[in-house]
Image: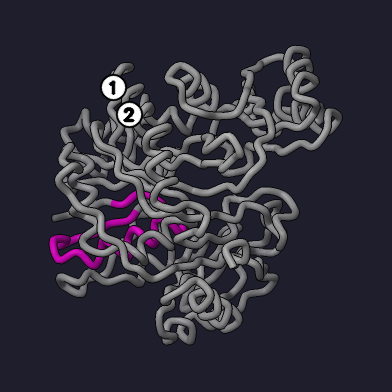
């Protein structure tokens, strides 16, 4: 089979790495990819993954490339091309793609859509309001006692949720989005949620329109600094499994969240094929959904795909074809952990073009895989091109040992201004 993979981050490197292991794949393109993806080789032939210099949001150009090359399947990693309707456009061209169509992708591309859907179908979530004007928004914050989360309705690269501890902070967040438009049109409409207390976990489910198969548990670390301090990022690390959910708790989530979600999709004729990633808060009242994402999390993908057994392509095809009920998901018992190395200044402005060294040394370490996120090539050098640069991932029998391996590998890699958290996985230990 010929596969076209869309995206350039750590999530897409993990997808490329696992897809390349499939003996069914004879050719694998990635648009636009990164330096790490370019280094992967197909198990079937030893051929390199081929990078295509097209941005993930270049919908017309991607469709034209697919028309010419006729991949048997296009796998879409990031949220933006899903929200822009790439799945729909490829279907119009008679080509198969994996990921929710534009209408179904609204679960992530519109926080207001997702909030209203949950309320319609009785899915437990935070008390919330949807606003386009400052006055009603501020009044709702007063009703919540000032503690709340102010969210941009649209996609905001992981920076659209502002956690507020009191009224003045929330008022500033509202003005930042609705008046100053710091996130552009993404913040023209906002969702304000009550602040939920508890432990947050990242759940993933593979969906085929009728069946939703839950993955094992994982936990992401969004804040930039140790101890969950500093601004939110796209994710500074993750691990799987977590000790916070047992089989009974997962069954409760299936019953209270996933089953009503599937029923709601059926009632509203939403055909959802791909990954659904609900962020869940484990509150004293039970699990509640913070928000939905319509694709794999990053860096959760890195820990999930190092634990997954079998051929990833088989699972993706079952999701596309609606046969997931007959397709087993098999997981290694080992724990996995990913520590993100980021550029200086991230999640704000950051420099690019810093030379990365030590990657070959890290690659020689046992039970370690370094996934590239924001990297490129300059001659013979691998350089930084993004805020999140690398995801150093380890696996072992037990989280403590996996964590030890990851933090032994991180110091072997160097680039100017590299920053990373030292407490990934500590909550579980």
In the structure shown, which secondary structural element does the residue marked by tag 2 occupy?
Answer: helix
Report the residue marked by disc 2. Answer: 262
In the structure shown, which secondary structural element does the residue marked by tag 1 occupy?
Answer: helix
- The stretch drawn in magenta includes residue 61: no
Q: Which disc is residue 160 wearing?
A: none
**Callout 1: 10 Å neighbours few (<14), some, many (20+)?**
some
Vertical placement of residue 116 versus 397, above or below: above
Vertical placement of residue 269 versus 161, above or below: above
Report the residue marked by disc 1. Answer: 266
Outermost residue, right side: 168
Apparent side of residue 370 relative to residue 188 in the rendered image (left or right): left
Where residue 245 sits: x, y (%)? Answer: 48, 52
Q: Look at the image and tell me whether residue 282 can be seen.
A: yes
Vertical placement of residue 407 versus 90, above or below: below
Residues at circles 1 and 2 in contact by the CB criterion of under 8 Å? yes
Apparent side of residue 355 relative to residue 417 in the rendered image (left or right): left
**Callout 2: 10 Å neighbours few (<14), some, many (20+)?**
many
Where residue 398 sits: x, y (%)? Answer: 46, 74
Identify which residue is drawn at 50% across, 78% down. Answer: 401
- Boundaries of the magenta span: 5-30
Identify which residue is drawn at 70% across, 51% down. Answer: 348
Where residue 268 sits: x, y (%)? Answer: 33, 17
Name the image quarter holding residue 161.
top right
């Amino acid at each position: 089979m010929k596969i076209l993979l869309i995206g350039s981050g750590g999530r897409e490197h993990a997808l490329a790495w696992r897809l390349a292991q499939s003996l069914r794949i004879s050719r694998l393109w990635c648009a636009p990819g990164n330096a790490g993806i370019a280094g992967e080789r197909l198990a079937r032939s030893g051929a390199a993954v081929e990078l295509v210099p097209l941005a993930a949001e270049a919908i017309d150009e991607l469709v034209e490339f697919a028309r010419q090359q006729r991949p048997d399947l296009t796998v879409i990693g990031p949220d933006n091309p899903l929200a822009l309707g790439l799945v729909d456009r490829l279907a119009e061209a008679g080509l198969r793609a994996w990921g929710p169509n534009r209408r179904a992708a609204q679960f992530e591309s519109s926080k207001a859509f997702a909030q209203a859907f949950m309320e319609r179908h009785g899915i437990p979530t935070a008390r919330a309001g949807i606003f386009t004007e400052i006055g009603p928004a501020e009044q709702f914050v007063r009703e919540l006692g000032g503690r709340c989360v102010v969210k941009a309705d649209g996609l905001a690269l992981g920076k659209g949720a502002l956690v507020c501890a009191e009224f003045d902070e929330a008022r500033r967040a509202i003005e930042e989005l609705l008046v100053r438009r710091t996130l552009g049109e993404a913040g023209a409409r906002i969702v304000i949620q009550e602040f939920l207390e508890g432990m947050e976990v990242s759940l993933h489910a593979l969906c085929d329109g009728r069946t939703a198969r839950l993955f094992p548990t994982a936990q992401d670390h969004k804040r930039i600094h140790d101890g969950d301090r500093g601004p939110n990022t796209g994710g500074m690390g993750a691990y799987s499994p977590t000790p916070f959910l047992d089989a009974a708790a997962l069954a409760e989530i299936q019953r209270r969240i996933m089953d009503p979600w599937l029923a709601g999709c059926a009632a509203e004729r939403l055909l959802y094929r791909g990954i659904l990633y609900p962020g869940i808060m484990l509150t004293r009242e039970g699990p509640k959904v913070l928000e939905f994402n319509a694709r794999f999390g990053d860096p959760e993908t890195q820990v999930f795909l190092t634990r997954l057994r079998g051929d990833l392509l088989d699972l993706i095809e079952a999701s596309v074809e609606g046969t997931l009920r007959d397709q087993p998901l098999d997981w290694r018992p080992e724990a996995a952990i990913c520590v993100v190395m980021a550029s200086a200044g991230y999640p704000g402005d950051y420099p690019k073009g810093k030379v990365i060294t030590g990657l070959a040394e890290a690659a020689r370490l046992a039970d370690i895989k370094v996934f590239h996120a924001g990297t490129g090539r300059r001659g013979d050098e691998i350089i930084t091109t993004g805020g999140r640069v690398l995801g150093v991932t380890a696996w072992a029998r037990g989280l403590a040992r996996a964590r030890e391996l990851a933090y032994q590998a991180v110091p072997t890699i160097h680039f100017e201004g590299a920053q990373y958290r030292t407490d990934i996985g500590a909550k579980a230990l």
